[in-house]
Image (cartoon, rainbow, N blue to C red):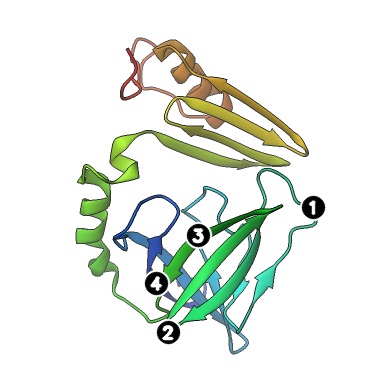
Amino acid sequence: KSIGYNFFPVIVKCLFVSSDPVVPTHCAAIFIIDDKRYYVDVGLGLSSPVVPVELCEDSSWQPKSISPHYYSYKMQRRDNAILLEGYNGSKRLSMVSFIPQPVELVDFIPLNYYGSMAETSPVAQSVIVEMFKEKGIARILKNRLTISSDDKVEKRLLETDDEFNTALREIFGIKVKYDTDLLIFPGMK
C-alpha cells in the first residue's frame, strides 16, 4: 500500500487441508492493476499459485514445465465465490475458495486464533514449513522432509530432534536462539 498498489484483503477457505465444514481462516489479496483484478497469495505455500492469477472467467495459468512442485491453475466462479483448482499431471485438487469482496484486517483476528488453536486445525496439529527454492520447493510436513528440484524429488523422515533442527537450520535458514535449544517436533518421541 505504501508504494502505491491498489489492493484489498480477502478471506479464503483452504479446501485441501481440512474436511467439511471448512472454516475460512486464510488471508490473500486482490490486486487491481490496469482495471484488471488478480488473486495474489504469498503465504499459503503447499503448491498454491506462485504468480498472480487474473480474476476472469476460466482464468488459468500453466507453468513452463509440470513438476512435483508446480501446479497448473484454473479459476471458476461458483455462485458468488471463486474456486481455484490446481492440476499436476492427472492429479486435480480444489485449492481455495473465496468471495472477492474487501474485508478489514481486524476480521482476521478471530479466524487466526481459531486456525492456530483449534484441535482440528492442520496448523495446530503438526509442523508445516515450506520454502520455494530457485528450482523447486523444500517442505516439512509433520516429520517428512521433501526437497523437489527440476524432475527430482528427495524424501526422508526426520526421526530425531537433532535431524529436525538440522533441517530447519541448513535447508530453511531457521536458527534456534542457542545451540543447546531444540525445537521439538510435536509427536516425536
Foreground: disc 4 or disc 2: 2
Taking 140 as reference, is 177 left or right? Answer: left
Between disc 1 and disc 2, whose residue precedes? 1
Can you identify the residue that label 1 sits on? 65
Q: Amino acid at mark 1?
A: Ser
Can you identify the residue that label 3 sits on? 95
Counting from the top left corner in percent of width and height, residue 82 is at 48, 76
Can you identify the residue that label 2 sits on? 79
Between disc 4 and disc 1, whose residue precedes? 4
Q: Amino acid at mark 3?
A: Met
What is the crowding at mark 3: few (fewer than 14 residues within 10 Å), some, or many (at least 20)? many
Q: Check the picture and name the quadrant holding the N terminus.
A: bottom left
Can you identify the residue that label 4 sits on? 9
Q: Secondary structure at mark 3?
A: strand
Q: Is residue 110 above or below residue 172?
A: below
Q: Amino acid at mark 4?
A: Pro
Q: Amino acid at mark 2?
A: Asp
Label 3 – label 2 distance at C-alpha: 17 Å
Counting from the top left corner in percent of width and height, residue 17 is at 41, 50
Specify the quadrant of the image occupied by residue 24: bottom left
Q: Secondary structure at mark 1?
A: loop
Taking 84 as reference, is 160 left or right? Answer: left
Label 1 – label 2 distance at C-alpha: 32 Å
Foreground: disc 1 or disc 2: 2
Between disc 4 and disc 2, whose residue precedes? 4
Between disc 1 and disc 3, whose residue precedes? 1
